[in-house]
Image (spheres, rainbow, N blue to C red):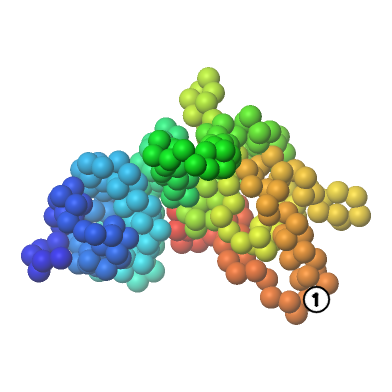
């Protein structure tokens, strides 16, 4: 980026003019987010104006996900400095300043979560993997028009990919839903927190009330899924006879449950039998999600929806 003063408008202009080769590299390395004045982007109306000024909806979605994920890292410290300069009435200590900064960043993330949901709930975008599947289908269809050979195999592959996409678009047709035992604010908050950590992705279906979350896809490790099942059994008192974990209840919750359950069970069995065995990576995110849902997590990185 140039050495001119960085503003949300200048960043949006570069995005709209496609002055980058790789969006991820541009957001991580080319934009100096630390140089932004907090007052230019943190207030709800400012971040809303910024993201809606990005013309390409898919680029806008990627930018919002990036900012939501790294908001604390980029804006917490500069927000504190801004508050120290303003020294608002009622802020009289370092702890007050830190709490106010966390509050401002939290409101910033809440607005981003709202704007992300507006796009995702349309069902048009459901994550990078879904987009790649659609692209794969398009490429294969073009190949079919150019070639006559291997048509049977290509048709089979297309049908398999179309079924996978269909599972994303219409999970209810494949017996996926949130069971009654998990329908509540606590479960919603747990899943919302895990979504910010890119561990789960909600899948939607049409209803009389619009597009609603029908189930989820798990993007964490299989071992982490086992830990998740273990902890939620405890939290929601789902255990069956003789303290056996209830795995079956999560079969309808996750679109890819069948690909997770076997290895997940093995992972749980391993650390149950050996108290020295390490918990799976990111197990702390599951614990944090439960604390967040119970209102026990201070400085939560997402605001309640």
Identify whether 228 is placed above or below 305.
Answer: below
142 vs 191, left or right, is: left
Q: Residue at x 76, y 71 (%)?
A: 271
Q: Which residue, as the protein is rendered here, is positioned at the far bottom?
A: 276
The percent position of residue 169, horizontal first and vertical second, equals 52, 34
Any part of residue 51 in sight: yes
- Assign a secondary structure to mark 1: loop
146 vs 224, left or right, is: left
Identify whether 215 is placed above or below 235.
Answer: above
Q: Which residue, as the protein is rendered here, is positioned at the far top?
A: 208
Any part of residue 100 in sight: no
Q: Residue at x 80, y 66 (%)?
A: 269
Q: Which residue, as the protein is rendered here, is positioned at the far front?
A: 149
Q: Residues within 10 Å of mark 1 (few under 14, many from 20)?
A: few
The percent position of residue 255, horizontal first and vertical second, equals 62, 43
The percent position of residue 223, horizontal first and vertical second, equals 67, 63
Q: Which residue, as the protein is rendered here, is positioned at the far left?
A: 4
In front here: 297 or 70?
70
Tell me the quadrant of the picture where the N terminus can be found.
Answer: bottom left
In front here: 31 or 167?
167
The percent position of residue 243, horizontal first and vertical second, equals 87, 55
In front here: 149 or 63?
149
Q: Residue at x 50, y 58 (%)?
A: 197
Q: Which residue, given by chain and number where applicable, does mark 1 sit on? A: 274
Identify whether 260 is placed above or below 87.
Answer: above
Q: How many marks?
A: 1
Identify whether 173 is placed above or below 285.
Answer: above
In front here: 153 or 53?
153
Q: Residue at x 70, y 48 (%)?
A: 258
3 vs 125, left or right, is: left
């Amino acid at each position: 980026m140039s050495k001119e003063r960085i503003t949300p408008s200048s960043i949006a202009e570069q995005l709209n003019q496609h002055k980058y080769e790789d969006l991820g590299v541009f957001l991580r390395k080319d934009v100096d987010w630390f140089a932004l004045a907090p007052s230019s982007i943190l207030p709800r109306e400012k971040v809303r104006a910024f993201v809606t000024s990005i013309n390409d909806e898919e680029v806008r979605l990627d930018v919002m996900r990036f900012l939501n994920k790294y908001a604390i890292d980029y804006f917490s410290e500069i927000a504190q400095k801004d508050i120290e300069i303003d020294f608002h009435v009622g802020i009289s200590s370092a702890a007050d300043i830190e709490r106010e900064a966390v509050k401002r960043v939290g409101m910033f993330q809440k607005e981003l979560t709202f704007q992300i949901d507006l796009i995702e709930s349309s069902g048009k975008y459901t994550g990078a993997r879904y987009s790649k599947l659609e692209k794969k289908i398009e490429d294969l269809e073009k190949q079919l028009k150019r070639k006559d050979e291997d048509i049977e195999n290509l048709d089979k592959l297309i049908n398999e990919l179309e079924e996978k996409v269909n599972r994303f678009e219409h999970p209810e047709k494949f017996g996926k839903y949130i069971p009654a035992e998990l329908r509540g604010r606590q479960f919603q908050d747990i899943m919302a927190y895990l979504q910010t950590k890119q561990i789960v992705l909600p899948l939607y279906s049409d209803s009389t009330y619009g597009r609603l979350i029908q189930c989820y896809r798990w993007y964490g490790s299989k071992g982490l899924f086992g830990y998740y099942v273990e902890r939620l059994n405890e939290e929601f008192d789902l255990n069956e006879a003789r303290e056996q974990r209830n795995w079956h209840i999560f079969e309808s919750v996750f679109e890819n449950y069948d690909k997770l359950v076997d290895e997940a069970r093995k992972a749980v069995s391993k650390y149950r039998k050996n108290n020295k065995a390490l918990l799976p990576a990111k197990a702390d995110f599951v614990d944090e999600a439960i604390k967040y849902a119970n209102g026990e997590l201070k400085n939560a990185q997402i605001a309640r929806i």
